[in-house]
Image (cartoon, helix red, strand yellow):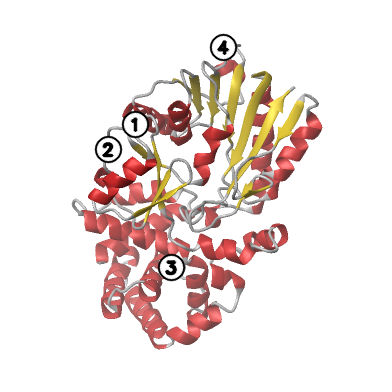
């Protein structure tokens, strides 16, 4: 347990410096003493994700126990990790406390730190019920989201904000997209049943597993029979209404889930996939290789047309724009603590620029799908409204998604939060 706590503290430190949690965990694992077992890797991931998922409550509990936060950030991160284990896992309390006391020496290097951590955590155990009750008396403590975020949801989704926050605290489902070129969802479901994997068929292509399993345990995964993709993301490619021989642009394409879906649905379509991050492009290309598809891939800023466009218009454009990620925080709980209100302003500028620039590469009569995994109007409805005001050669088409309201999909047990707009060029 000591090693898990120590590495989780490292990961939280990296997140506090602005790194996303996936990168933070990668860096933390590099500092492991020896090779981590599969169980240790899973435990480390659960501890880091869980601490960030419940950080609002944890901080509200610790605030009652501390006169002020320790000067050393690592010592406070250790208290957060141990508090998560005590409040939200089945770990033996004495083992959590004893381990944290030992780790305090590693992260702080003094006997005073050992006594400090021991005293705080034993007080937490003694007063647990009253501490948690008081912490959850505030909306930040109850829902473990920043106050500004909650206020925005209350304002923009007055009838749904509590349900959104509750869902955002839940563990996300593992959802698969069946490659219809290889088999039907029913046929794939039969293979899952033979493998003892309980599941439910959802939508045209989707399969939701009752319990997540490693992808190497999924029948036919390495052969491209199935891909991991949330249900909300599975609506993007069908919205393009692909036709034989079309030229399709997938902008901001990595890690390639939607690119692969386009190629699964398209009949002899030519696909260009643009991604600014070279590392993420490697993931996209690996996904295409697994699915046995080819596409023209370009590492470039999609808004900088001169760096990648050959001048030939596209019939279809998918813009899955950079956004706050406010609709996927149950998958990425670090997002809610890394984002700031001012980020929405800069993201809206980027989104508007991409929309304007990519509109110019679309042929007359072509269609552009604008998508975000956001719940905030600034990135969604307001962004599209501003675009319509700037351009006269555009017609907004209805988004035919049963679970969407005016293009907005709210998170539920199956879907992540997502937004779609379908725009046709006159």
> Which residue is label 3 attached to?
76
Decide which of tag 4 and tag 2 comes sooner along the chain.
2
Q: CA distance from mark 2 to mark 1?
A: 10 Å
Q: Which mark's residue is nearer the viewer, 3 or 4?
A: 4
Judge left or right: residue 252 versus residue 100: right
Q: In the rendered image of this protein, does residue 235 appear above or below residue 315?
A: below
Give the Cα distance between marks 3 and 1: 51 Å
Marks 4 and 2 sit apart, C-alpha to C-alpha, by 37 Å
Question: Is 126 on the left-hand or right-hand side of 67?
Answer: left
Image disc number at residue 182: 1
Q: Are marks 4 and 2 in contact (CB under 8 Å)?
A: no
Q: Which residue is mark 2?
A: 220
Residue 145 location in percent, x, y?
A: 56, 63
Provide the secondary structure element on which disc 2 rests. Answer: loop
Badge 2 vs badge 1, beta-carbon distance below 8 Å: yes
Relative to 40, 398 lies left or right? right
Between the residue at mark 3 and the residue at mark 2, the CA separation in whole angstroms equals 45 Å
Q: Residue 89 at what x, y percent from top left?
A: 34, 71
The residue beneath circle 4 is: 310
């Amino acid at each position: 347990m000591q090693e898990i706590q120590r590495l989780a503290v490292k990961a939280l430190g990296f997140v506090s410096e602005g790194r996303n949690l996936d990168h933070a965990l990668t860096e933390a694992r590099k500092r492991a003493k020896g090779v981590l077992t599969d169980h240790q890797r899973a435990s480390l991931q659960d501890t880091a994700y869980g601490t960030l998922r419940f950080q609002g409550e944890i901080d509200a509990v610790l605030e009652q126990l501390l006169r002020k936060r320790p000067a050393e950030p690592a010592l406070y991160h250790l208290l957060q990790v141990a508090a998560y284990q005590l409040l939200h896992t089945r770990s033996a309390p004495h083992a959590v406390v004893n381990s944290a006391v030992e780790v305090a020496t590693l992260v702080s290097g003094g006997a005073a730190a050992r006594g400090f951590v021991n005293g705080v955590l034993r007080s937490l155990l003694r007063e647990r019920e009253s501490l948690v009750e008081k912490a959850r008396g505030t909306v930040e403590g109850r829902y473990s989201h920043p106050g500004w975020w909650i206020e925005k949801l209350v304002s923009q989704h007055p009838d749904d904000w509590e349900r959104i926050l509750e869902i955002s605290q839940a563990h996300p489902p593992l959802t698969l997209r069946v490659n219809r070129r290889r088999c039907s969802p029913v046929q794939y479901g039969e293979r899952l049943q033979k493998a003892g994997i309980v599941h439910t068929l959802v939508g045209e292509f989707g399969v939701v597993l009752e319990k997540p399993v490693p992808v190497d345990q999924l029948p036919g995964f390495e052969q491209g029979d199935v891909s991991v993709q949330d249900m909300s993301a599975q609506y993007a490619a069908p919205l393009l209404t692909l036709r034989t021989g079309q030229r399709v642009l997938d902008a901001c394409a990595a890690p390639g889930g939607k690119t692969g879906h386009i190629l699964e649905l398209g009949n002899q379509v030519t696909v260009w996939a643009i991604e600014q991050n070279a590392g993420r492009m490697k993931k996209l290309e690996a996904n295409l290789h697994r699915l046995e598809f080819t596409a023209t891939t370009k590492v470039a800023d999609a808004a900088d047309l001169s760096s990648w466009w050959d001048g030939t218009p596209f019939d279809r454009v998918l813009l899955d724009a950079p956004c706050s990620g406010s609709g996927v925080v149950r998958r990425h709980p670090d997002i809610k603590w890394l984002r700031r209100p001012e980020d929405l302003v800069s993201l809206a500028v980027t989104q508007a620029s991409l929309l304007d620039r990519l509109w110019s590469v679309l042929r007359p009569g072509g269609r552009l799908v604008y998508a975000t995994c956001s719940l905030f109007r600034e990135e969604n409805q307001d962004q599209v409204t501003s675009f319509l005001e700037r351009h006269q050669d555009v017609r907004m088409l209805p988004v035919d998604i049963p679970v969407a309201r005016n293009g907005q999909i709210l998170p539920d047990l199956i879907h992540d939060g997502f937004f779609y707009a379908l725009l046709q060029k006159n």
